């Protein structure tokens, strides 16, 4: 993966995009720290698909909830009215 300082990426944006489209993601830094990665839309869509495939379904989440076999504990009400 090629790394570009932001100013260079701005000046040579066409080259950044061409490399990403060719299958080589391009990292852009700002003040020496990684800021963004430019990648081909096909790669982005592939990664999004993988992310969705790994996400648990609502049914999975519900089935993973802890089961408590004990009866629901009822709160006892005070025997006299409470002053607020």
Image (tube, rainbow, N blue to C red):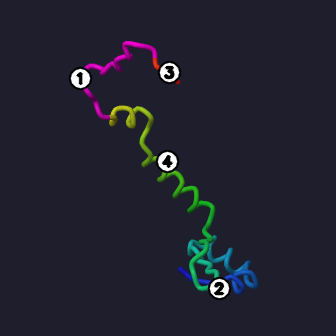
Question: How dense is the environment of label 4, judged by Cα within 10 Å: few (below 14), some, or many (20 and up)?
Answer: few
**Residue in the image at 49% along x and 48% along y:** 52
Q: Given contact means CB atoms under 8 Å apart, are the residues at marks 4 and 2 in contact? A: no
Question: How dense is the environment of label 3, judged by Cα within 10 Å: few (below 14), some, or many (20 and up)?
Answer: few
Q: Can you tell which mark lies on residue 70?
A: 1
Mark before the other along the chain sequence, 3 or 4 = 4
The residue where tag 4 is placed is 52
Magenta segment main secondary structure: loop
Q: Where is residue 69 in the image (x, y as percent from the top left)?
A: 23, 24
Mark before the other along the chain sequence, 2 or 1 = 2
| SS at badge 4 | helix
Mark before the other along the chain sequence, 4 or 2 = 2
For the residues marked 4 and 2, what is the alpha-carbon distance in whole angstroms? 32 Å
Question: How dense is the environment of label 2, judged by Cα within 10 Å: few (below 14), some, or many (20 and up)?
Answer: some
> Residue 69 versus residue 61: which sits nearer the camera?
69
Q: Where is residue 36 in the image (x, y as percent from the top left)?
A: 61, 72
> Residue 83 versus residue 43: which sits nearer the camera?
83
**Residue in the image at 33% along x and 36% along y:** 64
Q: In this view, does 44 lie to the left or right of 71?
A: right
| SS at badge 3 | loop
Q: Where is residue 30 in the image (x, y as percent from the top left)?
A: 64, 81
- Eye-nearest disc, 3 or 4: 3
The residue where tag 2 is placed is 5
């Amino acid at each position: 993966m090629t790394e570009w300082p932001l100013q260079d990426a701005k000046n040579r944006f066409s080259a950044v995009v061409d490399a990403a489209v060719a299958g080589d993601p391009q990292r852009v830094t700002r003040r020496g720290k990684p800021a963004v990665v430019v990648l081909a839309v096909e790669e982005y869509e592939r990664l999004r698909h993988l992310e969705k495939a790994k996400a648990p379904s609502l049914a999975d989440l519900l089935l993973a909830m802890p089961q408590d076999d004990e009866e629901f504990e009822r709160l006892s009400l005070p025997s006299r009215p409470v002053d607020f």
